Amino acid sequence: MERLLEVKDLKTYFNTDDGLLKAVDGVSFYVDEQEIIGVVGESGCGKTVTQLSVMQLIARPGKIVGGEVIFEGRDILKYKPHGEEMRAIRGGKIAMIFQEPMTSLNPVLTLNQQLSESLMLHLKMNKEDARKRAIELLRLVGIPSPEARIDDYPHQFSGGMRQRVMIAMGLSCNPKILIADEPTTALDVTTQAQLLELMTEMVERFRSSLIIVTHNLGVVARYAKRIYIMYAGKIVEEGTCKEIFKHPRHPYTIGLLNSVPRLDTVGKRLVPIEGLPPNLTNMPDYCAFLPRCPYKTEKCRTSPMPDLRDVPGEGHRVRCYVDIAEVDNVTVK
Amino acid sequence: MSQSNEIILKVNDLKMYFPVTRGLLRKKVAEIKAVDGVSFELKKGETLGLVGESGCGKTTVGRCVSRLYQPTGGEIIFEGEDIAALPEKDLKRIRRKVSLIFQDPYSSLDPRQSAGSIVGEPLIVHKITKDKIDYHRRVETLFQLVGLDPALMNRYPHEFSGGQRQRIGIARSLASNPSLIICDEPVSALDVSIQAQIINLLLDLKEAGETELTYIFIAHDLSVVKHISDRVAVMYLGRIVELTTPQELYENPLHPYTQALLSAVPVPDPEIEEKRERIILEGEVPSPLNPPSGCALHQRCPIAKPECREVIPPLSDRGGGHLVACIRA
């Protein structure tokens, strides 16, 4: 499989009143063709800003201050955010689905207008062809009687249906990569299951790659091939899905796995991660997770932020000094 | 978990219909049957989980029980007294005994009130404390009980994180020494790592409290409900479709809706996920404005038969207190 997108040492900072906020601080990841990856982290960890930076959708006071985004062999960060080249990529070659289907559709435009827009812009279709294609897409994502509903407005659809429309819109120009940012968080569980199945089915059909950004480890467990765990603007652990769930090595990943109640275990007391996520404007030099870490050693306190290092297991890397496999007491079963 | 056999709450055929009005004269044109015949019992010290998708009526049940709504019909027998039709002036007495924890820790706290005064307000409203010193001591104890530093009493809600705000909300709900707390999605607005802290706190309070606490725990997340509850009621379109213990529900779900709901919840383990079979319900939850005839699930149900269209299945015991409302299960 070929490498489709490679992000290297991406840095996006926000200049706030409280100081420089390093939302994304040296993030590197890649996606192969037709691969599904997961980016997992809690709110404020920089997972969304990372993806927005790839699309160059960062507004002031945010700024992409460093790194490369190699897409199809070229560094697309070199393109101007409003330039021709970037616009051709945005929505055309890389498309994004946002969390809130209620707010990310335009309430005053019909579905036809919204779906046709990108088809006419990127694929140079005329109005009639675009409309036909839009109906086709709506049928693909399971909107009943799309011919009748294409001239409806977003408020006439339920939340799940709107997210289906977003999926249709995201895939309309046959993108190489679909980025789904918390695609199912605002939806009910049964709808969530429907949409995840639909989305993975669709990217397979369109031969696209999929980046699922989520806070829910369960969502990625089923579909992602590889996973990146983010904390405080940095990737703290990466590896194949099986590796991460079977041999989690970063204290944060272990904490996440231990703190969610699971359907298949009974009555075990949850082990929460103590404390709070750090304030990103005032980061210490040492490991950002240290104040909450149960495995911390003296070395962690006196050394700078650890680098990602290789550990046993395919492509498994972790940003931690401590060898947790030796410390044991990992309660994840 | 400590549980007596004393029934603290008995809900009988609870109905809550909301009128849909139209025009200047607000003529009633239809009714939304948000809750349509819900019955359950709650023992003292027990935690009952109410689970279901949005619009299934779980929050409305909670609001009826706490009498924020005046139910359209049915009985709510709380500590031996039917409170379903109690007039407004008698409700203060009930509100002291039944308190609520809300979903959104951002909008459920008054931004212009200090944390201490939020927590202490029930003490004043219900005239629980004798004097200022007593009041202060009580608020301090409440802060400590929920794991907040009493030194933060004079701060305002915006100075706290989401998890801390939820702790303030919990402290407020405990202030009047209630016997029943209705927790309406208390963790769904919080980050994963914070959720566990709050769930553990709710469990600890049950053991530590002065009076024995009973919870109604409302949530859409089946794994959270299963974790915290002694019994779980699954709701669909205004009715309870299955009610049993969490273990039984997980190991032996009888209602097709419960089965689909369980299979839709992802498990954070790729190996288990690979083997699990997914039951995906077609379509969406029908509108409660125009509910289907017979069993509300029949249009989406994989095992429906023609007669499902006609009969509303009653909740019946399938042994050991496992209640199911399905004629096919």
Image: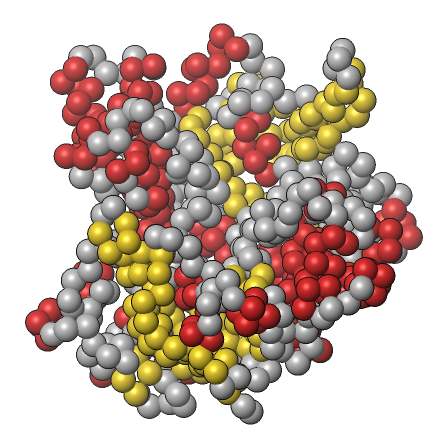
The N terminus of chain A, quarter of image: bottom right
**Res. B174 visible in picture:** no
The C terminus of chain A, quarter of image: bottom left
- In screen coordinates, is B326 left or right of B108? right
Q: Residue at x 61, y 59 (%)?
A: A192
Query: Who is closer to the viewer here, B112 or A50?
Result: A50
In the displayed orientation, state which residue is furthest to the right: B306
Report which quarter residue A21 is drawn in.
bottom left
User: x and y percent of residue B148 in the render?
Assistant: 22, 40
User: x and y percent of residue B310 in the render?
Assistant: 89, 43
Q: Is residue A27 above or below residue A281?
A: below
Q: Which residue is drawn at 17% across and 22% down?
A: B136
Q: Which residue is drawn at 36% across and 65% down?
A: A64
Query: Who is closer to the viewer here, A44 or B5?
Result: A44
In the displayed orientation, state which residue is furthest to the top: B89
- In screen coordinates, is B208 left or right of A214? left
User: x and y percent of residue B218 in the render?
Assistant: 52, 42
Query: Who is closer to the viewer here, B84 or B80?
Result: B84
Q: Is residue B319 above or below residue A333?
A: above
User: x and y percent of residue A122 in the render?
Assistant: 67, 68
- In screen coordinates, is A64 left or right of B185? left
Query: Who is closer to the viewer here, B257 or B188?
Result: B188
Q: Which residue is drawn at 56% across and 81% down?
A: A35
